[in-house]
Amino acid sequence: MKKTTYFLQLIIALFLFGCSEDFLDIPPEDSLSKAIFFESQADFEQAINATYAPLRDLQQAGGNAPGSAWGMGELTSDNTYYKFNPNFRAVQDGEGLADHYPNNANATIGAKYVTNYLIIARANQILDLIDDIEFEDQALQSNIKGQALFLRGLSYFDLVQFYGAVPLHTVPVTSRENAALPLSSADEVYAQIVNDVSEAISLLPPKSSQEAGRATRGSARMLLGNVYVVRENWSAASTVLGELINSGEYALLPDYASVFDLANKNSSESIFEVQFLEGTEGFASFFQYNQIPMPLTAEQVAAISGVPNSQAINNQGFNIPTPDIIDSYEDGDPRKSVSIDSINVDGVFYPYINKFWQPHSTPGLTGVNFPIYRYSEALLFYAEALNEAGQSSEAITFLNQVRERVGLAPLAGLDQTALRQAIMDERRVELAFENKRWLDLVRTGTAQAVMTAFGERVKANPQDYYFPDGIAPPPVAFTTISELFPIPAGETLLNPNF
């Protein structure tokens, strides 16, 4: 029996760059060889558009499996859980993630791995050939090269944080032999990311000179700063993040709710976000519809979505805010009502993520972008880097910029330990449901303790965590908290190096 794996998809991906002038368009899957296709500046413009396209797939659910970005970045944390539906049980992938017993056949884990390597494959094709073509516009050539380097670095950063050691492809795959590479260590992967993103910074234009939605010098600096924070290179992190903050290209919007308004896509607070477009052309976002406390009647779905002709949804709801995240907001913090709302289902109020619901006309087709990096996170990363470098008095001013935007009193007089916790508490509520929580727990070394305690609360009081009476999580739930996820079985079976 033939097995389709990402290795074959990598080879096929070399030939999938079709024609489109719209940045949001996914090119048709024409079979074009690189010798025929990559001949002009326009070819590379189309190819870089195709390299962005899979970013949308990371955010969306597939079948009954959660979207890999939020399924692994949020659902695995203490921020969200699921509303158990005893009448719909095709949900093992999501429950395995939330309850921390995933296996290497988990569809969400496989989707993240394959999708990131698809982005890498497309970026590699561009980077391998772009210097051989004479562009009419040399600035555009540098711009496209910088975008490809940024996207490759972003994808490897996603892979190394969630899987650890992974194969390191930096040139196009042209045969089965060079498709099946051995694992590179996390250190080797991080070194490649730093090289890619550092070069991207030198090539990319600032936000003010770039087409909205594309990678910029600022987004590359933010990615590099994020890498340095994870690697605890606090001096390098504060340097690159300071450059971003002092660039004058970014600013907080006046109020938190406006950040997610459709009118403010790619705003001054946006450093990088995944682009979606409402409509039936295939570019719409629908992840919100997977994150409500199903099953719901048509009227209940309409009450949440605002779309009168909504249909009933009888699946199981994932990424439901937990009592823990609800209780983590300070009194008077407006981010709580912006981020979380609730709906009455048979006399019980269930919470749901509210911040990404915006007006749209067709059920399941919204135009809401998904934020990867916002300026508020740059301020919090900068505060963290300064604090860890012993500059707590300077660090707290950047934390307070985020707090003051939402009308909370500024903090003062905190020592390094107290400020460290305050920054993490602020990250939790400021960036709630933006797929940051699990990675924050891992990089701070608190994942084991936090998620073990969370699991004990769920098991002790399952009805508080959306289980019907008489039902609780399985005994295996939360018994092992692994900080890394398994490489998908489809890859390990066919790669002789694993």
Image (cartoon, helix red, strand yellow):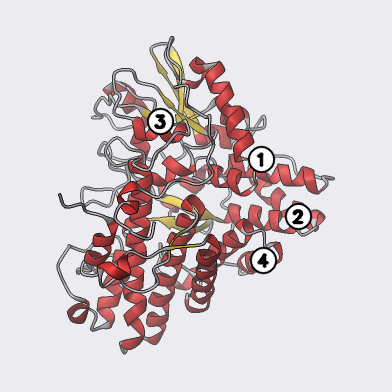
Compared with residue 250, is residue 293 higher up or lower down, i.e. above or below? above
Figure quadrant of the C terminus: bottom left
Image-based side of 471 in relation to 14, left or right: right
- The residue that mark 4 highlights is 242
Which residue sits at x=75%, y=55%? 388
Q: Residues within 10 Å of mark 2 (few under 14, many from 20)?
A: many
Is residue 276 in view from this perspective? no
**Label of residue 95 in the image:** 3
Q: CA distance from mark 3 to mark 4?
A: 40 Å
Secondary structure at badge 1 equals: helix
Instruction: Residue 390: name its quadrant.
Output: bottom right
**Label of residue 387 in the image:** 2
Q: CA distance from mark 4 to mark 1?
A: 22 Å
Amino acid type, callout 3 = Glu
Image-based side of 444 in relation to 296, left or right: right
Image-based side of 394 in relation to 188, left or right: right
Which badge, 4 or 1, is on the more N-terminal residue? 4
Q: Residues within 10 Å of mark 3 (few under 14, many from 20)?
A: many
Secondary structure at badge 2 equals: helix
Amino acid type, callout 4 = Gly
Q: How many marks?
A: 4
Which badge, 3 or 2, is on the more N-terminal residue? 3
Q: CA distance from mark 3 to mark 2?
A: 37 Å
- The residue that mark 1 highlights is 425
Q: CA distance from mark 2 to mark 1?
A: 15 Å
Which residue sits at x=59%, y=30%? 452
Which badge, 3 or 1, is on the more N-terminal residue? 3
Q: CA distance from mark 2 to mark 4?
A: 14 Å
Amino acid type, callout 2 = Asn
